[in-house]
Image (tube, helix red, strand yellow):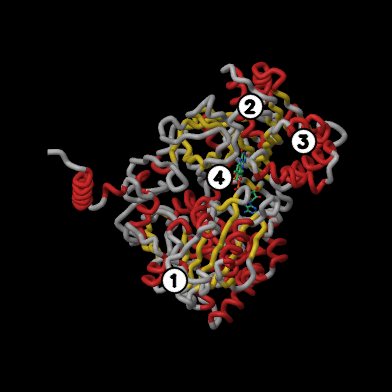
Amino acid sequence: TQLDTLDIIVLSVILLATAAYFTKGKLWGVTKDPYANSFANTNGLKAGKTRNIIEKIEEAGKNCIIFYGSQTGTAEDYASRLAKEGKSRFGLETMVADLEDYDYDNLDQLPEDKVIFFVLATYGEGEPTDNAVDFYEFITGEDVSFSESADPPLGTLKYVTFGLGNNTYEHYNSMVRNVDKALTKLGAHRIGDAGEGDDGAGTMEEDFLAWKEPMWAALAKKMGLEEREAQYEPIFGIVEREGLTKDSPEVYVGEPNKMHLEGSARGPFNAHNPYIAPIVESKEIFNVKDRNCLHMEVDISGSNLSYQTGDHIAIWPTNAGQEVDYFLDILGLTEKRDTVISVKALEPTAKVPFPTPTTFDAIARYHMEICAPISRQFVATLAAFAPDESSKAEMTKLGQDKDYFHEKVSKYHYNLAGLLRTVGGGQKWNNVPFSAFIEGLTKLQPRYYSISSSSLVQPKKISITAVVESQLIPGRADPFQGVATNYLLALKQKQNGEPDPKPFGLTYEICGPRNKYDGIHVPVHVRHSNFKLPSDPSKPIIMIGPGTGVAPFRGFVQERAKQAEDGENVGKTILFFGCRKRSEDFMYESEWEERKKVLGDAFEMPTAFSREGPKKVYVQHLLKERSKEINELLEKKAYVYVCGDAANMAREVNTVLAQIISEQRGIPEAKAEEIVKNMRASNQYQEDVW
Ligand code: FAD
């Protein structure tokens, strides 16, 4: 007999349910977030977490939800800090929540004695961060609807907002502004000012600190909260695991998740699960002594990763050995570096930010930003655990006085170990509960790079172009060195069998946890971007990419040359490039000549060298010089691409383009600016800036 569709469905359901029963749900594990799985073991959280936020807070006894939309970890970090402060100063029962983990259509049912915080970063061109996309679309959507359909739908909701943005971008803090507007429109009541932090002005931390005091006061008034003497309460419990050593198979010594620990890493590879990619080639493309520019080729053929020209690749760095040593030393943990510990969240809604059991060494090396700038608030927290009274007084002062903090700490780019060493005169800070560091430091973030190859030419090999971050700082003996780029430099040196030629060369655990990265591998994932060539290659393009901003344009030009070789009609391709001197930092000089041979007159590359002539010349000046031609190309609907420095260059290019349009077309500047705005809105003007 034949089975009809319904029978088949019923049978499949029974079969799957049976399979699930006998495999204890393991079959489902394949599609679940591997990160969540690895946390599940350490946190005691059950698999199959609820997406119902109301249910969650009721179960956990919370009255304050702090949602975050975070791309690089700062918003998440601020959310945790607010949660901690709300609890310790005002006795709020706080929980931090990833926007991605919940549904929102029942926000109208939030009981009136609760409050929600939204800590929201704006990413790129005014976009929400990856984890906030669904929320953003929901809350700002035309047809947003809630389960109870009251009028107004969120009339009883109280909320607090803080946005993280960068004023050098066109859409400054647009994420938080739009969410705030949408919530107000839905009838919700904001408490305190809508805070905004500005990374562009470098005042994010201070903006945050200045915003939160009046916000707390307003919230305390509204909710009838009493402030109390803040007591430090650890969020994480650390348990030493005596039966285990760093060689025990279940101990994480830097593996990012359980699949990596068990040697069964598989896709999807993403921000929670990197692919350990072989580096097939690495070299330097500058000829200057103390400045290094790396070109690397990473092979993704062994993975199911793919990319498109214009995408970003994320590099998962490890901290330099010397920094790990300093960190462990100043905390008095050198002897214990390989001691195996488990970290347990002491409250149900906190997440341990790395898999455990693990070691102090692995946490410092692979999981925490031990080199990053320190927050003043964290300094104030640490004061209570200072090794002596004078260090305590100094930490308290640093925590309270922003100018003093700048003078003593920020100016020298000190990281945590550097600060503690300076303040305590080298005494060990071994009274600080380790939980405080897990709470006070951000988790180590992957760094993004604009892919500098074309996926049409090399679909399985991604190239990176990166300048190594190293700065001499007056008053400081050793240079300040960036985390990821110096790690990449070390990988390059190892791959090419070079002895370390740099006076301040840092050493790294190049071979990775359990030598899993040996043979020169680097953990990566790919992030898709909207920075894309026109689908019709005959469209003219204007690219502006000085310095490392040229990275994606190497890919763009590679792609256009390939299209020309394949017989396609390729439109005008102009690349404005700038650097210091032709003889020093003109990147990929010979490659451009090769492309020129293929593309002929269609390809042009005006160059500005800022340190060659008597006057500094930048790409903006070159654009201006070619006003007539640029305007003609724009009239032919040329696409404009800008990549590199967000703070100055990108903004100036925007201004210059408006000036060109205004002059050439004889229209008022305001009108020309409007045209540029519309070009952006229709993707005819695209930016990839950082
Ligand atoms: P980090 O250690 O992250 O330091 C970076 C900066 O932070 C320092 O210069 C300093 O200003 C500050 N800082 C860090 N620690 C401290 C401290 N303790 N005190 C004070 N200040 C501190 N870069 C490229 O070279 N090529 C590219 O193609 C490229 N593409 C990018 C694309 C995107 C979308 C983005 C977001 C960035 C891109 N970048 C690119 C930049 C890149 O991601 C990194 O930021 C850069 O390489 C520096 O990384 P790092 O880990 O070496 O430095």
| Residue where numbered disc 2 is placed | 557
Residue 569 locus on image (x, y percent): 63, 20
**Disc assigned to residue 447:** 4
Quadrant position of residue 283: top right
Amino acid bearing label 3? Val
Q: Does the residue labelled 4 lie within 8 Å of ligand 1?
A: yes
Q: In which quarter of the image is the N terminus?
A: top left
**Labels 3, 4: front one:** 3
**Residue 237 visible in the displayed image:** no
Residue 556 located left or right of residue 8 = right
Tell me the crowding category of disc 3: few under 14, some 14 to 19, or many 20 or more residues within 10 angstroms, Cα based.
many
Q: Distance between the residues labelled 1 and 4?
A: 39 Å
N-term mark: 3 or 4: 4
Amino acid bearing label 2? Val
| Residue where numbered disc 3 is placed | 619
| Residue where numbered disc 1 is placed | 109
In this view, 63 is above or below 315: below
Residue 611 locus on image (x, y percent): 80, 34
Quadrant position of residue 535: top right
Please report the residue visible at 56 percent of the width from the left and 18 percent of the height from the top: 566
Residue 47 located left or right of residue 442 = left
Residue 205 located left or right of residue 116 = right
Q: How far apart are marks 2 and 1 (CA)?
A: 54 Å
Element type at marker 3?
Answer: helix
Amino acid bearing label 4? Arg
Element type at marker 2?
Answer: helix
Q: Distance between the residues labelled 1 and 3?
A: 55 Å
Please report the residue visible at 77 percent of the width from the left and 32 percent of the height from the top: 630
Q: Distance between the residues labelled 3 and 4?
A: 26 Å
